[in-house]
């Protein structure tokens, strides 16, 4: 591809600025301009927040179901079991995110040692 | 803390100065589970870039300028695969669409009376971490103090992440594989638990479950825009049902 730069180190920096910073902050900046007309308790804000929550939930599900890199070597059932254990621990320990994360980590690290 | 809207002048004067709120934001960031998880994730990022030969300076710059771990992973992946720049930019753009609803939903809460420049700068620091913690913490913060508090919170997240990525870079190759798997899995499990904790009404719960349930469906049919569809369709259903239940009562 003619667009790729011959020096790979320089190419990394170009990627960060042109392919990373620009296409990311354009959405952040556009959202600031858009939100100037939104009130803290407006209907539109409830909708926008629902979209953001669903989108983030989609990102979470993808990270678990279709992981990139090394995590793909961990069996799917173990990844799902880890999620279930983390949510169960969160509920059991009076809604403690910390407890849920710790239990999930024990399951995934222990399981990865045994089953991969 | 009571809402100070239309407060007498002396109430505003009694409020600690901005730097105190900046400091409190930093402390909140350091003591949050989200912060620990974020730093652990960036330890993993530091290890990854060393393994694949991505330059450390560009990696640090990506944390500073992009500030979105999924997008940064796409950049590193594109670098390794030798993908052309426009292809990487498109993939990053699609993954960063989520910042539009995130920033648009948090900005009215934190902006107070700040100007456009301050808001644009603040928006750069919005990522999942600061978004989730802002939704949880901001209601207890006086409106005028929210901007400095937000900068303290989000700056400690960003600069702590850069430090963590340096640690990961130094540790690369020395960590057992199972532990690396655990570091990578921190992101989805902590995001999920914090979304659960921040869910208070029908709209929140439905948006969360719709997003999770639609992901495998759209992975089959959605093509490259699947996340966008998940957000729009899942969010619309959640909003619609929530509104229907509110107007009925």
Image (tube, coloured by chain):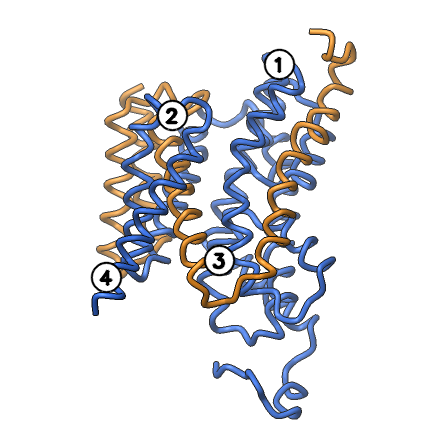
Chain colours: A orange, B blue
The disc placed on residue B222 is 2
How packed mark 3 is, by other alpha carbons closer than 10 Å (few <14, some 14-19, many 20 or more), is: many
Residue at 69% x, 40% y is B65
Q: Quadrant of residue B85?
A: top right
CB atoms of marks 3 and 4 within 8 Å: no
SS for callout 1: loop
B105 and A93: which is toward the camera: B105
Q: Are marks 4 and 2 in contact (CB under 8 Å)?
A: no
- Residue at x 42% of width, y 31% of height: B179
| Label disc, if present, on residue B245 of the rendered structure | 4
Residue B56 left/right relative to A112? right
Sooner in the amino-acid sequence: mark 3 or mark 4: 3
Can residue A16 be seen here?
A: yes
Left or right, B139 with respect to B86, comes to left
Q: Are marks 3 and 2 in contact (CB under 8 Å)?
A: no
The image shows residue A65 at horizontal and vertical percentages of 33, 27
Task: From the image, tell me which residue sits under label 1.
Answer: B83
Label 1 vs label 2, nearer the camera = 2
Q: Point out the frontmost of discs 1 and 4.
A: 4
| Measured Cα–Cα span from mark 3 to mark 2 | 30 Å
Same chain, labels 1 and 4: yes
Badge 1 density bin: few <14, some 14–19, many ≥20, Cα 10 Å: some
- Label 1 vs label 3, nearer the camera: 1
Residue A43: image quadrant is: bottom left
- Left or right placement of residue B141 versus residue B159 in this view: left
C-alpha distance separating marks 3 and 4: 28 Å
- Residue A101 in sight here: no
């Amino acid at each position: 591809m003619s667009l790729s730069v011959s020096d790979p180190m320089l190419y990394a920096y170009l990627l960060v600025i042109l392919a990373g910073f620009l296409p990311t902050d354009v959405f952040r900046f556009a959202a600031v301009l858009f939100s100037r007309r939104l009130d803290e308790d407006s209907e539109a804000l409830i909708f926008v927040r629902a979209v953001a929550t669903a989108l983030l939930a989609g990102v979470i599900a993808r990270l678990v179901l279709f992981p990139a890199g090394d995590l793909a070597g961990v069996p799917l059932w173990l990844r799902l079991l880890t999620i279930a254990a983390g949510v169960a621990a969160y509920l059991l320990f009076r809604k403690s995110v910390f407890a849920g994360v710790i239990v999930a980590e024990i399951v995934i690290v222990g399981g990865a040692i045994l089953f991969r | 803390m009571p809402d100070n809207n239309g407060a007498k002048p002396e109430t505003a004067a009694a409020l600690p100065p901005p730097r105190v709120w900046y400091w409190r934001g930093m402390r909140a960031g350091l003591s949050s589970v989200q912060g620990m998880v974020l730093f652990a994730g960036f330890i993993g990022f530091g290890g990854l870039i060393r393994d694949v030969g991505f330059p450390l300076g560009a990696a640090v710059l990506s944390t500073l300028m992009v500030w979105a771990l999924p997008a940064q992973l796409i950049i590193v992946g594109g670098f390794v695969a030798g993908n052309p720049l426009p292809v990487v930019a498109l993939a990053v753009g699609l993954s960063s669409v989520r910042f539009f609803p995130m920033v648009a939903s948090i900005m009215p809460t934190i902006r107070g009376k700040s100007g456009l420049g301050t808001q644009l700068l603040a928006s750069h620091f919005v990522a999942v971490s600061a978004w989730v913690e802002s939704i949880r913490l901001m209601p207890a913060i006086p409106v005028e103090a929210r901007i400095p508090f937000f900068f303290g919170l989000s700056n400690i997240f960003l600069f702590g992440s850069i430090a963590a990525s340096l640690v990961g870079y130094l540790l690369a190759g020395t960590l057992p594989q199972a532990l690396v798997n655990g570091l990578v899995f921190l992101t989805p499990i902590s995001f999920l638990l914090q979304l659960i904790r921040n869910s208070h009404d029908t709209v929140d719960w439905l948006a969360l479950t719709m997003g999770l349930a639609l992901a495998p469906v759209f992975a089959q049919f959605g093509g490259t825009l699947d996340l966008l569809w998940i957000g729009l369709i899942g969010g619309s259903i959640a909003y619609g049902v929530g509104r229907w239940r509110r107007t009925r009562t």
